[in-house]
């Protein structure tokens, strides 16, 4: 299986997701920005703004090629004199809605290949509600569990725990949202000697996760797009966006790595909301919906049961 097949799928995935989001939003349209990377390859950044449901959303496709950056050589324990080149391709998505009852969502699916043949898949999808709705959390997680279970019985348990650990804000002692799944460095086992899947099987899993995005998020957009909200709830949304920004700029490995390796800044920071607020030592009223949400931003909750 060649990298071109994976790239073609990711391009089509971007197209299909953008079409589904536009149709559901009803007003917003994606604007495309085609860019070239300094080391080779490039991508298509698509941004939707000021829609009926979405205040800002981005769906990025990229396929970047070049010599392995010193930062990545160190991370991968590669020798300084080894002649390694790479291809990295994937789709990355973040959606920030207008209505505080519609959740933020993020997804990333990606593939990395070295010139020596070493390759792996990575990705994840997680949901960040401004107000946690338990039925939505169950819908989200059970859908992901079904996708995982189609490929390996251990995937959901392993990857949902990984998501809890990854999408965590240590300085706030809270999770970014209600989790989801996260996986990385999934290398194929073509010989079938271990528990790993073949490259084709891993690719089928990544495709299944990628294709789950549009049905999940369009359902949540439709369910909550017309929910009434107050100015107080809108201000809470801005505060929760602030926590989202804190995670992305302080803890997210992809954001930090992209900026450290001279990636395309506008595409990397596409994940940030158009407006976020911070209020000194804010504490919600005991028993309020805001307080209940904070109580549910913790690791280890089994939403899929």
Image (tube, rainbow, N blue to C red):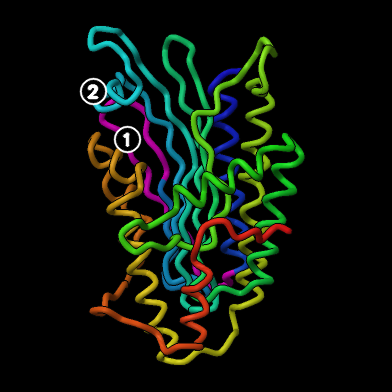
Which numbered marker is on residue 104? none
Answer above or below: position of 284 versus 185. below
So how many labels did they put on this image? 2
Task: Determine whether, in the image, residue 59 is placed left or right of residue 66.
Answer: right
Q: Nearer the viewer, mark 2 or mark 1?
A: 2
Q: Secondary structure at mark 2?
A: helix
**Residue 79: quarter of image:** top left
Label 2 with label 1: CB-CB less than 8 Å: no
Task: Determine whether, in the image, residue 276 is placed left or right of residue 87.
Answer: left
Task: Determine whether, in the image, residue 140 is placed left or right of residue 164.
Answer: right
Q: Is residue 116 magenta?
A: no
Q: CA distance from mark 2 to mark 1?
A: 21 Å
Q: Nearer the viewer, residue 45 or 135?
A: 135
**Residue 159: quarter of image:** top right
Answer above or below: position of 44 versus 249. above
Name the residue: 67% across, 22% down. 195
Image position, residue 143 (x, y; %): 71, 54
Residue ID for mark 2: 70
Q: Nearer the viewer, residue 214 or 245?
A: 245
Q: Which residues are magenta?
A: 25-44
Residue ID for mark 1: 36
Q: State the quadrant of the C terminus.
A: bottom right
Image position, residue 7 (x, y; %): 53, 31
Q: State the quadrant of the N terminus.
A: top right
Name the residue: 66% across, 75% down. 223
Task: Determine whether, in the image, residue 142 is placed left or right of residue 285.
Answer: right
**Residue 9: quarter of image:** top right
Q: Nearer the viewer, residue 161 or 143?
A: 161
Between discs 2 and 1, the one toward the N terminus: 1
Q: Decide if residue 267 is in sight here.
A: no
Image position, residue 155 (x, y; %): 66, 39
Answer above or below: position of 102 versus 38. below
């Amino acid at each position: 299986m060649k990298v071109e097949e994976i790239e073609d799928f990711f391009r089509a995935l971007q197209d299909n997701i953008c079409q589904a989001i536009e149709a559901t939003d009803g007003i917003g349209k994606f604007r495309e920005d085609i860019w070239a990377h300094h080391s080779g390859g490039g991508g298509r950044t698509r941004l939707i703004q000021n829609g009926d449901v979405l205040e800002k959303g981005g769906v990025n496709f990229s396929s970047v090629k070049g010599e392995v950056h010193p930062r990545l050589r160190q991370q991968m324990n590669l020798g300084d004199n080894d002649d390694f080149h790479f291809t990295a391709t994937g789709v990355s998505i973040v959606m920030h809605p207008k209505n505080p009852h519609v959740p933020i969502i993020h997804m990333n699916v990606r593939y990395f290949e070295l010139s020596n043949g070493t390759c792996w898949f990575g990705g994840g999808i997680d949901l960040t509600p401004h107000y946690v709705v338990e039925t939505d959390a169950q819908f989200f997680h059970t859908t992901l569990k079904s996708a995982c279970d189609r490929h390996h019985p251990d995937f959901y348990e392993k990857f949902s725990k990984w998501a809890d650990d990854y999408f965590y804000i240590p300085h706030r002692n809270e999770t970014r949202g209600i989790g989801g799944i996260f996986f990385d460095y999934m290398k194929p086992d073509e010989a079938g000697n271990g528990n790993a899947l073949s490259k084709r099987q891993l690719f089928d899993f990544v495709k299944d996760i990628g294709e789950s995005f549009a049905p999940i998020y369009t359902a949540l957009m439709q369910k909550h797009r017309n929910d009434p909200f107050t100015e107080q709830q809108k201000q809470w949304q801005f505060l929760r966006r602030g926590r989202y920004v804190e995670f992305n700029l302080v803890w997210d490995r992809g954001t930090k790595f992209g900026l450290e390796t001279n990636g395309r800044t506008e595409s990397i920071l596409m994940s940030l909301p158009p407006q976020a607020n911070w209020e000194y030592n804010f504490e919600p009223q005991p028993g309020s919906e805001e307080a209940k949400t904070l109580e549910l931003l913790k690791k280890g909750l089994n939403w899929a049961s």
